[in-house]
């Protein structure tokens, strides 16, 4: 499991040295050719690139979207000469906010960015069909997450640290029989059969014969739950994956969505972001 990043810092792009090739390059819409070879077509305000526009850099990379005071700011699309693409939110020339990154080799990330890096909740699809759903920090998985193999028969679930490493959690094998290996301090322990109830299969601990602590549960309906259990019910931060591949990432209370959470489709695209009350959407915010 190896993340491949297609992102790098965008250089300090702009000085106003050059000439207005056509149109109105002070307050209006025009075409400006920079002295170093960059070319801009779009809106200007007080001689700054501001509003909608397209910039072709001398490196061969292009940006099209919102500008503010000569900087990428707002929504835009950045296409690298090598074929890598980022589309989403920008702040002060950097990928910052929610966006989509697609590499020429087929890797795809959908989620939150900060200072050019994957940061926050996200969905990462590998070129071989494997996927990761979870938290990212400074470009790598960090915190609660689930890694699913392309054949859907293996899951690595738990608390991720340093990208591929997992501090604690489970390796799940959904084959003819459901097995799991408990992971503690990054080391795999003995393989065990998932505990089977009438409707669920479960990896984790019990307290007073009820699921307790961090656990993984797959229902006979193929819905999956990852998170912390109290008194037999999911409580706190968790991930729910439906049999159709849609997933919820957020807070739970007594097995229901509660508080802040996000719903994504099977491609990692955001469907809803907002607040929930007893499993129901409380407000709309996207």
Image (cartoon, helix red, strand yellow):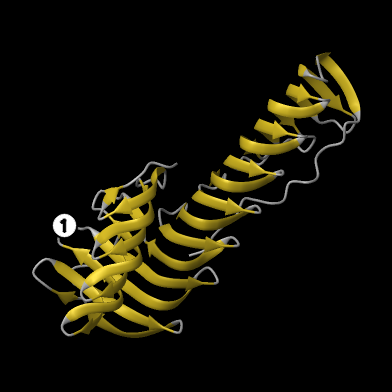
Question: Among all residues in the image, which is located at the extreme top?
Answer: 23
- x, y percent for residue 132: 43, 59
* Disc 1, SS: loop
Q: Is residue 248 above or below residue 30?
A: below
Q: Which residue is mark 1?
A: 221
Q: Give residue 68's quadrant in the image.
A: top right
Q: Which image quarter: residue 78?
A: top right
User: Which residue corresponds to the image point at 66% horizontal and 54% vertical from the top-left?
Assistant: 115
| Res 223 quadrant in image | bottom left
In this image, 252 relative to 223: left or right?
right
| Quarter the C terminus occupies | top left
Q: Looking at the picture, how far across and down is residue 47, in whole percent?
A: 83, 25
| Crowding near the residue tagged with mark 1, few <14, some 14–19, many ≥20 C-alpha atoms within 10 Å | few
Residue 14 shown left or right of residue 206 in the figure: right
The x and y percentages for residue 121 are 47, 56
Query: Looking at this view, is 110 or 26 the one in front?
Result: 26
């Amino acid at each position: 499991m190896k993340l491949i990043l297609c992102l790098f810092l965008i250089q300090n792009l702009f000085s106003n040295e050059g000439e207005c090739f056509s149109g109105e390059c002070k307050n209006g819409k025009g075409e400006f050719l920079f002295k170093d070879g960059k070319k801009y077509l779009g809106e200007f305000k007080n001689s700054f690139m501001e509003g909608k526009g397209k910039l072709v850099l001398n490196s061969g990379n292009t940006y099209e979207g919102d500008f503010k005071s000569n900087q990428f700011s707002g929504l835009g699309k950045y296409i690298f000469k090598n074929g890598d693409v980022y589309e989403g939110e920008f702040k002060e020339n950097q990928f910052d906010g929610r966006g989509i990154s697609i590499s020429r080799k087929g890797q795809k990330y959908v989620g939150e960015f900060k200072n050019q890096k994957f940061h926050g909740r996200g969905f990462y699809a590998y070129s071989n069909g494997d996927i990761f759903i979870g938290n990212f920090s400074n470009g790598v998985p960090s915190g609660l997450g689930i890694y699913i193999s392309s054949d859907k028969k293996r899951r690595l679930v738990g608390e991720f640290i340093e990208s591929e490493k997992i501090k604690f959690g489970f390796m799940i094998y959904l084959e003819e029989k459901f097995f799991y290996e408990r992971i503690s301090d990054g080391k795999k322990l003995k393989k065990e059969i998932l505990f089977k109830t009438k409707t669920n299969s479960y990896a984790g601990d019990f307290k007073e014969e009820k699921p307790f602590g961090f656990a993984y549960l797959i229902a006979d309906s193929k819905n999956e739950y990852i998170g912390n259990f109290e008194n037999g019910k999911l409580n706190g931060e968790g991930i729910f994956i439906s049999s159709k591949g849609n997933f919820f990432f957020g807070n739970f209370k007594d097995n229901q969505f509660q508080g802040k959470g996000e719903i994504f489709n099977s491609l990692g695209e955001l469907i809803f972001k907002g607040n929930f009350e007893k499993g129901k959407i409380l407000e709309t915010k996207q």
